[in-house]
Every structure is written in structure tokens, then in C-alpha cells.
Amino acid sequence: MKPRAAAAAVLSSGVPAKLRPHLPRITAFLIVFSVGYSLGIVSSSTRPTPKPSQTVIRPHAAHLTAGSSSTTTTTGVAASSSNGTTGADYPRSPPHDLFRFRDECAEAVPGDAVLQTLMDKLFDGESPYASFPPDHTAALLHPAAARPRGWGSTGAVFAELIEEVRPDTILELGAFLGASALHMAAVARNLSLSPAILCVDDFRGWPAFRGRFRRDVPAQRYGDALLLPQFMANVVAAGAAERVLPLPFSTASALAALCQWGVYADLIEVDAGHDFHSAWADINLAWAVLRPGGVMFGHDYFTGADDRGVRRAVTLFAKVKGLTVRPHGQHWILSPKPHGDARR
């Protein structure tokens, strides 16, 4: 027994007296910890490598992440510096539904049959201006204005593009009181052109718009904003009722119908919702009904109303489709739609 006591004395000689009673417990803890740590290393080395993310970038969106300098944040968002016009961040793996829009539409209706086709399908074959306005409606409206109030509605971009494209059909998303549509009709007339001008708007306005435009819009009646009859009265006053046709529906439903019916446009102006998601949907849906060689443009690229929503949508769309964006004052212009590519 003496040798064992001597060995214990040697082992515990370097341990403070206060810790000597706890030495067996400390030793047991260290042994258990070492065994657990060793088993963890062994199990991690034999565990299969996890599969990468299953999010797929569609082929026509692949160049969002290829060939551009970017840095990835911890949230998986890449900050692209390939386009100097914005500092927007774009997702490295865009959600599938972000690009799930219809690419192909029905066989095209001839340009000279567009107006009658739409009147047949929407207004029982009769012009909505027939016998307009009835007396009870006229009493509720503001005096018709051949040049109603608008925003950037008479910019040089309209004359430049109409002269360049010489369209048979113009499609406008967001009409309000008709300022842009009537200006385009006047420009076309001066160029000896007579395109059909289709104005898509639900003619409901937006929350609190009356506070800003009380002098320009009629008072509501039983919850009806009366923007459609005011728009129509302005069109009649400008002598443009034969070529300017209102499509009083949401942009999404109207564009889906135009695609289904084969109604295409040579020139499209996008000036409806200014938030990113509305602008993104409008641009993608309208692209399907733009004829190859046609041009799409819009407003609020460099305005306070945009708050980067329109600009972000336009810039992202151009990157996805491989197009260029040309700023023109407050407006933006996309390069012409390529020929022979149904996806564009």
C-alpha cells in the first residue's frame, strides 16, 4: 500500500489543497468531454455533403448573375455594379414566379381591324362614344378639356417615337384624364398617321387622389369616381373619338385579354402603377403583345413619384431580356423588341 500512497502523493503534489477533493470529478468530466469531442469529429467526417440549393435560374435570367461584378451578402442578395443607372440589388436566384409570364399570344388581328374587334368583344359591337354623354352624366362632369391635365404628357419622347415607329396601334397603360393619349393622337395626325390608341385604365384613380386634383376631376357619385366619362368627354372634345378607345379594366386583365385575342401594338407606353411589383407585371405582360420591332417606353424613370419602383422594374427587365434602357428626360425607352424570338 505504501507505493500507491506515494504515487498518489506525487500526482496530487501540484494540485492546490482546495481542489484535491474534486479531482476525481474533474478527471471524469475531462474524459467524457474528450470522448464526445472525438465522436463528433468522426461523425462529421463521414456525413454526406449537403446538396446545393435547388433554386433554379431560368436560362433567360441567367445573365443576372453571370458576367457582372457583384458581392453576395449573408442574405443571398447580390449587389450588382454592372449598371450604373441604379444601385439596386438583384437576387442571385430569382423566385420562379418572378419570370413566369406568358410568352406567346394568339395569331395577330390585322391592324385595321383592331378597333372593331375590341368593340365587338367589349361593347357589343357599338362604339362607347355613341350618344355620349347622356344628359344625366353630362351634368356631373367638368367642362371637357381637349388638353386635360397630365404629367410629362407632352414630352418630346412621344413625337420622337411616333415618328420613328410610325405605329398602326398604340397601347397606353394608365390613361387618367387622357392627356398623353390625346397628345399622341395630335402628334400622329400631324404626321398623317391614324393609329388606334388603346387606353387601359380602371378609371378608379387611387386613394386620396381627389385632394390633389379636385379642380380637374368631377365629384364622386355614389362611390363612382366618374373618371371614365370624364376621359371620354375629353376625347370627344378633342375630336379623337374615332381613334382613341378606352379599355376600362385592370392592366393585368386587359393585357391577358389582348394576348388571348391577338391584339398587338407597335408602340406601348407604361404609366400605370408606380410600385415595383405593379410596374414589373405591367412591363412583362405588355411585352407579350408588343410586335417584334416595336418599342416600349414609359414615365417616372427619374421622378420623385417613382421612388425607385419603376426604375428598378425597368432595369431588371432589361437585364433579363438583354435589352438596353435609354433615359429620355423623365421617361425610359427600351431597345426595340427583337425579331424571331417568341420569348421576347
Image (tube, grey):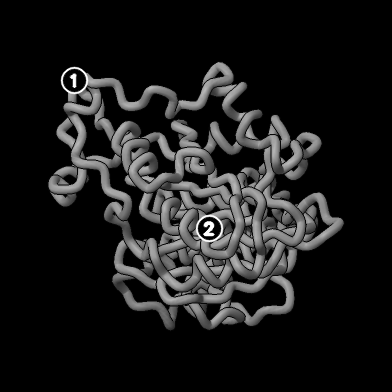
Q: Residues within 10 Å of mark 1 (few under 14, many from 20)?
A: few
1 or 2: tag closer to the N-terminus: 2
Give the camera-side residue of 31 and 232.
232
Q: CA distance from mark 1 to mark 2?
A: 38 Å
Question: How far across and down, in percent of the image, does residue 59 sit?
Answer: 79, 57
Q: Please identify the quadrant where the N terminus is shown.
A: bottom right
- Tell me: residue 262, above or below residue 341: above
Q: Which residue is mark 2?
A: 189
Question: How far across and down, in percent of the image, does residue 72 sit?
Answer: 57, 72
Give the camera-side residue of 27 and 171.
171
Give the secondary structure at mark 1: loop
Give the camera-side residue of 287 and 241.
241
Q: Is residue 232 left or right of residue 71?
A: left
- Tell me: residue 282, above or below residue 186: above
Question: How far across and down, in percent of the image, does residue 312 sit?
Answer: 49, 64
- Tell me: residue 15, above or below residue 47: below
Residue 24 visible here: no
Give the secondary structure at mark 2: helix
Q: Which mark is residue 222?
A: 1
Q: Residue at 31% of width from left, 62% of height from top?
A: 305
Q: Amino acid at mark 1?
A: Tyr
Q: Residue at 29% of width from left, 21% of height from top?
A: 134
Examine the image and state in which quarter residue 118 appears: top right
